[in-house]
Structures are given as structure tokens and as C-alpha cells.
Amino acid sequence: MSTSFKGMVKVLCVLVGAIPALAQAQSTTVRGTVTGESGTPLQAVSVSIPSLRVGATTNERGEYSFSVPATNQQAVMTARRLGFNPRSATITLSAGTVSQNFMLGAAATQLTGVVVTALGIEK
């Protein structure tokens, strides 16, 4: 065997050995619980990182979980649900698991007017 061929085989072996490491890119699992002011878990809350366009919806226990690439950078998370004031928190997307809980307060809403229509009425 020629020396250059042996060298190419060595390089190829190193590259093939590195493929599994490259395939397992570091990721961050973001998880937590969303509750109301009384401590009751809130279902159907949208929890997201808008800048990454990723997120999840809470289950019946108020829990959520999603994965994003680990960048070691900070990102703003938002939790929102109709009838509640949205909350935001800043997290660092380091490898592993990041826990972030939210407590949402009820939004004060007022009706500004009522519109009555008479659709379906025949004369």
C-alpha cells in the first residue's frame, strides 16, 4: 500500500468516527409549569420563544416541554392565554434542561359596547 493511501484511510476512519458526535448536536430542553394566581395549573397556555419560532401548549397539569438547539445565548420566553396577562422571562439556552415556571394573573376586561343584530328574522 502506498503511504498516501494509508493516510487517506486514517483520515476516513477519523471522519467516520466523528459522525455520531456531529449527529448528536447539543440541545436544550425547556420545561416548566404554568399556574394561575391561586396556584391552580392552567391548561392550554401557549409557551414559546418567539425569536426561534418554537414552543408548546400546556397539558391538563399545566406542564409544557420543548427542545431547542443549545446556543449558550439568552432568549425571551413568553406564556400567554386568553383571559390572562401574558408573562415573559429570559433564559439561557445551555445544554441540558432549563426549567422556567410562570404564574399568570387574570386580565381585567371590559365590554366597550354591545351590538345586536336581527339576522334570520322574516317579515
Image (cartoon, rainbow, N blue to C red):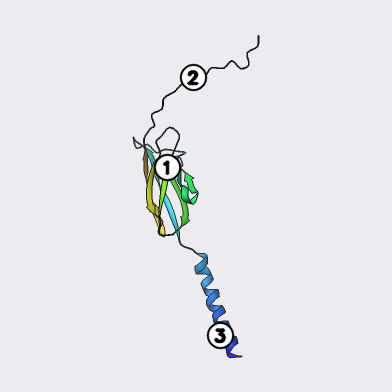
Residue at position x 47%, y 50% in the image: 51
* Three-letter code for the amino acid on which mark 1 is drawn: Ala
Picture quarter with the C terminus? top right
Which one is earlier in the sequence, the residue at label 1 or at label 2? 1
* Three-letter code for the amino acid on which mark 3 is drawn: Gly
> Is 9 left, or right, of 83 in this rendering?
right
Mark 1 neighbour density, 10 Å: few (under 14) some (14–19) many (20 or more): many
Where residue 43 sits, quadrant-wise, is: top left
Q: Which residue is mark 1?
A: 79
Q: Is residue 39 above or below residue 108?
A: below
x and y percentages locating residue 77 in the rendered image: 42, 47
Residue at position x 58%, y 83% in the image: 8
Element type where label 2 sits in the image: loop
Which one is earlier in the sequence, the residue at label 3 or at label 2? 3
Where residue 85 sits, quadrant-wise, is: top left
Q: Is residue 121 above or below residue 11?
A: above
Element type where label 3 sits in the image: helix
Element type where label 1 sits in the image: strand
x and y percentages locating residue 39 in the rendered image: 34, 37
Mark 3 neighbour density, 10 Å: few (under 14) some (14–19) many (20 or more): few
* Residue 54 appears in the figure: yes
Identify which residue, 114 or 80, lies in the foreground: 114
Q: Which mark is residue 114?
A: 2
Q: Which residue is mark 3?
A: 7
- How many numbered circles does the render carry? 3
